Image (tube, grey):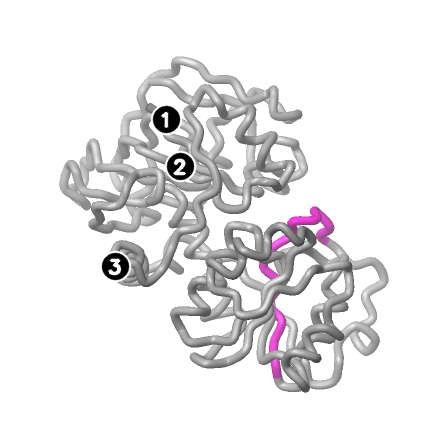
């Protein structure tokens, strides 16, 4: 089969398409014929050598969608549509940047959909992260107000869509004025141009502050995001688009406004149920939700795809079709 192999960390040029042996699933694992896989910034971190886990050489990729090609334990019938994600995929064992991938059955989420594979490939990890940030990180209620800091990321766009489905008042940020239409189409009620300080503008729109905020940019703007939230509200730290991960000399009494809660979210396959995935795909098929698909690539275009991911100019999820 053809797959992308990384022998060691480096720039996008270390991503090499090669012919490699087809994996054989062992007991408790399944073999998936990969029809599409989404790109994630954690794969950029792994490829560049700044990730805290993983080993080389490796076929990267923390998610994939496709059909079951073999399931020795009978967990799924051959031909079943499935998604697989996380659980060490693309880090401790070979991942989804390939025509086939073997994964533990425990990280497989089945679904049934007539949507195109390019659309389906954009969904699993993006939906898991967005839905988990709302459900676990914020414990959000329908109809509440929501600030998305970093709205043009794929997760930010998915959050706007999920917020709109739940009747939430969605405020979303972008540094680029040309992205206003993109955010509004995703479900944002208010778009704020981010100059590094948005709390004042948020409170002009929602006096007293929003009920919750999802931080996708990083700790370099987290302090300002905290000040956009009402007392009793919550900020969920989910992403680090700026690649700024840690806070030097963190002083909680100075950083945290009175009564504002700070949480974090990073989930696994088990955090996205088959029912939740199916409900979202059905909503997309019915025209009630949209998948923020940015660009679609072939396997031979993986280097350019990573360059585009680093540049952050796609305006949606990047997806690769391996055939």
**SS at circle 3:** loop
Precedes in sequence: disc 3 or disc 2: 2
- Residue 272 seen in the current view: yes
In the displayed structure, 49 sits above or below 139; it is above
In the displayed structure, 69 sits above or below 271; it is above
Q: Which residue is denoted by mark 1 in the rendering?
A: 322
Q: In the image, is 53 to the left or to the right of 120?
A: right
**Magenta-colored span:** 233-245
Q: Main secondary structure of the magenta part?
A: loop
Residue ID at (38%, 55%): 290
Residue ID at (74%, 61%): 221
Q: Which residue is denoted by mark 3 in the rendering?
A: 286
Q: Which residue is denoted by mark 2 in the rendering?
A: 37
Q: How many numbered discs?
A: 3
Which numbered circle lies on residue 169? Answer: none
Q: Position of residue 241 (x, y in %)?
A: 65, 49
Is residue 235 part of the magenta span, yes or no? yes
Q: In the image, is 14 to the left or to the right of 258?
A: left
**Quarter location, residue 76:** top left
Q: In the image, is 54 to the left or to the right of 207?
A: left
Q: Position of residue 218 (x, y in %)?
A: 69, 56
**Quarter location, residue 298:** top left
Disc 2 + disc 1, Cβ < 8 Å: yes
Precedes in sequence: disc 1 or disc 3: 3
Q: Position of residue 223 (x, y in %)?
A: 76, 68
Q: Position of residue 124 (x, y in %)?
A: 38, 49
Return the residue nearer the eye: 136 or 221.
221
């Amino acid at each position: 089969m053809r797959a992308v192999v990384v022998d060691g960390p480096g720039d996008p040029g270390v991503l090499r398409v090669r012919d490699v042996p087809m994996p054989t699933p062992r007991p408790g694992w399944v073999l998936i014929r990969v029809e599409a896989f989404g790109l994630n910034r954690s794969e950029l971190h792994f490829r560049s050598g700044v990730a805290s886990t993983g080993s080389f050489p490796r076929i990267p990729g923390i998610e994939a969608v496709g059909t079951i090609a073999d399931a020795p334990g009978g967990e799924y019938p051959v031909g079943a549509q499935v998604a697989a994600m996380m659980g060490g995929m693309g880090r401790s064992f070979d991942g989804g940047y390939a025509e086939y991938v073997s994964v533990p059955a425990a990280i497989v989420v089945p679904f049934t959909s007539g949507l195109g594979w390019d659309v389906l490939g954009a969904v699993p990890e993006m939906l898991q992260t967005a839905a988990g940030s709302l459900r676990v990180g914020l414990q959000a209620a329908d109809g509440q107000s929501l600030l998305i800091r970093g709205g043009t990321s794929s997760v930010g766009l998915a959050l706007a869509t999920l917020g709109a489905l739940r009747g939430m008042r969605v405020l979303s940020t972008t540094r680029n004025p040309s992205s206003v239409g993109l955010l509004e189409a995703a479900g944002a009620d208010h778009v704020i141009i981010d100059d590094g300080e948005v709390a004042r503008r948020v409170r002009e729109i929602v006096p007293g502050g929003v009920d919750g905020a999802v931080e996708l940019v990083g700790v370099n703007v987290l302090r300002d995001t905290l000040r956009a939230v009402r007392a009793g509200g919550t900020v969920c730290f989910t992403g680090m688009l700026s690649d700024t991960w840690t806070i030097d000399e963190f002083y909680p009494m100075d950083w945290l406004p009175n009564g504002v809660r700070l949480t974090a979210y990073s989930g696994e396959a088990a955090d996205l149920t088959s029912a939740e995935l199916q409900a979202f795909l059905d909503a997309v098929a019915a025209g009630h939700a949209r998948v923020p698909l940015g660009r679609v690539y072939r396997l031979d275009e993986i280097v350019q795809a990573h360059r585009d991911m680093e540049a952050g100019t796609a305006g949606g999820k990047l997806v690769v079709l391996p055939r």
